[in-house]
Amino acid sequence: MLFAVLIYGGQFVTVRHAVINGLSPHDLVALRFIVAGSIFLPIVLRRGLADLGGLGWGRGFVLAVTGGAAMSALGNIGMTLAPASHAAAIQPGMVTMVSTAGAVLLGATRLRPPLLAALLTVSVGLALIALGAKPGADLPSPWKGQLLFACAGGIWGIFIVLCQKWQVDAISATAAVAVLSALYYLPVYALFLEPRIFGAPLVPVLLHAFNQGVLNIVVALLLWTQGARTLGPGLAACFPPLIPVAGTLLAMPFLHEFPSGWQMVGSALVVVGLFGLALVQIRGLKPLR
């Protein structure tokens, strides 16, 4: 679980590093789903292409938008406008808030005072991160990036709620997202988004392709799934709040991004609120029907 946290937290740092060193946000999305789509295509074919392994094409495309290329593109574009540490706090914060709200609406949990307190803590933390952002030469519009991070996290939260509502297992969901994202995104990328990967140095492209398509989609998923199965839902729920911590800490040495005092307080509140939501989940959540 800790290695998966490191991969997920490091994702924000590697994307930010890539976009300030010549690759576009769209290049990274394309690399992610060229690799991941190729890896998961045999799984989809084996389980049945006609109904997308029992998931259905309609549901598959909805998941591919909310958890696939469209979501990744929003977050990556945000990296050109705001620091990676902001993404590391805002996206997971919004994911948890939206997925928790979805759980309440679907009857998986009740809106009790501890849950409200945790949600309020996350909200205040996100507000402090936003208010503490200052434009710079390389980050002229951080608030726009923060808005994109919030949108990316929000639709990812919808993806999680839908997976729970439709009872989709992790491998089926990831396979559908990887293959269908490649199907709808790569033609748009090739025709309209000025691909740079063929003109960029080969080694960085291969490294980012491995990171995007293998580490973040395959390895982290398998580690997270196995870790959650081994530890049980109680202990496993304590690990998602560590992703903002990992992203913020990694951004300091690798990107020289040092949060302001208010942003540090905001990030700390997000982590505390996410731990609070994890505790509520341990004590009160029941399976969605």
Image (cartoon, rainbow, N blue to C red):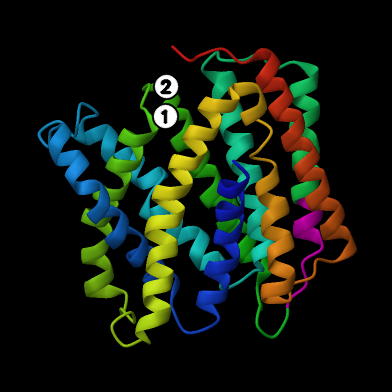
In which image quadrant can residue 248 be found?
A: bottom right
Q: Up-down: is 34 above or below 200?
A: above
- What's the amino acid at mark 2? Lys
Structural distance between the alpha carbons of marks 2 and 1: 5 Å
User: What is the span of residues highlighted in magenta in the rendered image?
Assistant: 127-135
- Residue 251, given in percent of the width and then of the height, sits at 69, 67
- Picture disc at residue 162: 1
Q: Residue at x 73, y 52 (%)?
A: 245
Q: Residue at x 87, y 59 (%)?
A: 262
In which image quadrant can residue 28 be found?
A: bottom left
Magenta run includes residue 130: yes
Q: Of 242 and 182, which appears nearest the observer?
A: 242
- The residue identified by callout 2 is 165
Q: Secondary structure at mark 1?
A: helix
Q: Secondary structure at mark 2?
A: helix
In which quadrant will I find the C terminus? Answer: top left
Query: Badges 2 and 1: C-beta atoms under 8 Å apart?
Result: yes
- What's the amino acid at mark 1? Leu
Q: Residue at x 74, y 15 (%)?
A: 112
Q: Is residue 12 left or right of residue 269?
A: left
- Residue 58, given in percent of the width and then of the height, sits at 23, 34
Q: Up-down: is 193 above or below 213?
A: below
Q: Up-down: is 141 above or below 246?
A: below
Magenta run includes residue 176: no
